[in-house]
Image (cartoon, rainbow, N blue to C red):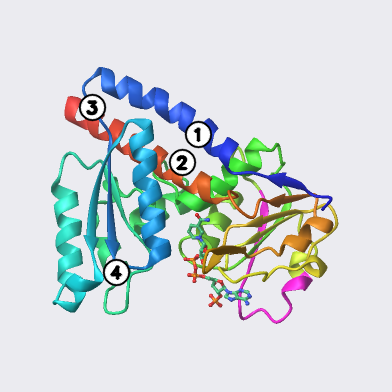
């Protein structure tokens, strides 16, 4: 492979080093930031993501709170109302500065409705419509974690974004769409010319081959192949798929023979996502502390 590999861990570490200093400053005034998670169902990959979020909180000196509506509870009658009650409890709990609902939720549960019932000030994932609106308007607020992690990764590796052509494959609400907004906004680490393509575009390569930076935001293994990438371009797998215990990125590993940069198959964008989640939670704790003090 000739491409240089972008690892997520050093990017996440740099974010977490800064966050740790802010947690120490909050500790000095008696505040411990708290993250809440709501997991619905027993999906193994989702449970693993939630576990890693709690482990990171513990390692960095934050509190974390877990609600798990498991398959047995669902079989016994737990439903959308149960999920909404959990959302209301976290909204009202002063120990929880920010929280998330792990996506996806099983059939019979409405993720979007639960999301809109969250207090937008406690939105750890930056996916509440109010916060997505702030992203559009370029107002301060929590930014969706995976897009923010990808932007931090580009900055960390010194990859210029301003004025360059970025093609995002996928237009989903958690990744493709917010990433396109973030990188096309004005400011540092942004100002790109962004094109979004998706499943209804017949010839993806027509767009991706012209891109300086290609991002897979699909969640379909090897949807981006070497013939779709310009020599020397940057190829990022935001979308990933677990096949058993094997992680399959959106960008096929053989793209490393053509690209200038490629994300690591394991430990690529994932660690940066968790770091951004922690950063959003600490920012919420700082805001909550400021509003209590005023
Ligand atoms: P989503 O809502 O399911 O969106 C997937 C998008 O991919 C859709 O826009 C779909 O097009 C498009 N698509 C599907 N098949 C395609 C194909 N063959 N060619 C081109 N486009 C295709 O997903 P999401 O919630 O935005 O998340 C996307 C992925 O991000 C997830 O699968 C997950 O792997 C990943 N993710 C990663 C992390 C991380 O920590 N690394 C965190 C969150 C999410 P249509 O709109 O036309 O259907």
Q: Are marks 2 and 3 in contact (CB under 8 Å)?
A: no
Q: Quadrant of residue 113?
A: bottom left
- Image x and y of residue 159, in percent: 71, 41
Q: Which of pointers 4 and 1 lies earlier in the amino acid sequence?
A: 1
Residue matched to label 1: 15
Look at 52% across and 62% down and name the residue there: 177
Residue matched to label 2: 275
Dot 4: few (<14), some (14–19), or many (≥20) neighbours within 10 Å? Answer: many
Residue matched to label 3: 31
Q: Are marks 2 and 1 in contact (CB under 8 Å)?
A: yes
Look at 24% across and 60% down and name the residue there: 68
- Outermost top residue: 28
Look at 62% across and 70% down and name the residue there: 221
Instruction: Identify the element where label 3 is drawn.
Output: loop
Q: Is residue 47 left or right of residue 27?
A: right
Specify whether residue 258 is in view: no
- How many angstroms separate mark 4 from mark 3 (CA)? 32 Å
Q: Which of pointers 3 and 1 lies earlier in the amino acid sequence?
A: 1
Q: Which of pointers 2 and 1 lies earlier in the amino acid sequence?
A: 1
Q: Which residues are magenta?
A: 192-206
Q: Which of pointers 2 and 4 lies earlier in the amino acid sequence?
A: 4
**Quarter occupied by the C terminus:** top left
- Image x and y of residue 246, in percent: 57, 64
User: Residue 41 — which label?
Assistant: 4
Q: Are marks 2 and 4 in contact (CB under 8 Å)?
A: no
Instruction: Identify the element where label 2 is drawn.
Output: helix
Instruction: Identify the element where label 4 is drawn.
Output: loop
- Image x and y of residue 266, in percent: 60, 52
Q: Which of pointers 4 and 3 lies earlier in the amino acid sequence?
A: 3
- How many angstroms separate mark 4 from mark 1 (CA)? 31 Å
Above or below for 284 versus 222:
above
Dot 3: few (<14), some (14–19), or many (≥20) neighbours within 10 Å? Answer: some
């Amino acid at each position: 492979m000739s491409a240089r590999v972008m690892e997520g861990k050093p990017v996440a570490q740099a974010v977490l080093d800064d966050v740790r200093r802010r947690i120490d400053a909050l500790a000095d005034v008696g505040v411990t930031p708290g993250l809440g998670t709501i997991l619905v169902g027993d999906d193994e990959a989702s449970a693993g993501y939630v576990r890693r979020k709690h482990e990171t909180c513990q390692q960095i000196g934050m509190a974390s709170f877990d609600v798990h509506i498991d398959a047995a509870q669902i079989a016994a009658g737990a439903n959308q109302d149960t999920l909404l009650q959990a959302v209301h409890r976290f909204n009202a709990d002063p120990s929880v500065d920010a929280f998330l609902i792990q996506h996806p939720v099983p059939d019979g549960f409405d993720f979007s409705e639960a999301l809109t019932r969250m207090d937008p000030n406690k939105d750890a994932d930056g996916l509440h419509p109010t916060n997505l609106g702030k992203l559009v308007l370029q107002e301060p607020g929590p930014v969706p974690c995976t897009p923010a992690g990808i932007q931090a990764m580009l900055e960390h590796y010194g990859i210029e974004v301003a004025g360059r052509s970025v093609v995002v494959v996928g237009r989903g609400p958690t990744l493709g769409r917010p990433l396109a907004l973030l990188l096309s906004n004005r400011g540092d680490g942004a100002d790109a010319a962004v094109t979004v393509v998706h499943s209804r575009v017949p010839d993806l390569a027509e767009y991706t081959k012209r891109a300086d930076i290609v991002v897979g935001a699909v969640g379909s293994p090897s949807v981006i192949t070497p013939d779709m990438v310009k020599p020397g371009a940057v190829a990022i797998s935001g979308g990933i798929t677990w096949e058993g215990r094997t992680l399959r990125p959106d960008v096929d590993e053989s793209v490393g023979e053509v690209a200038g940069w490629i994300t690591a198959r394991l430990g690529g964008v994932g660690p940066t996502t968790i770091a951004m989640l922690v950063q959003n939670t600490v920012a919420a704790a700082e805001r909550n502390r400021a509003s209590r003090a005023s």
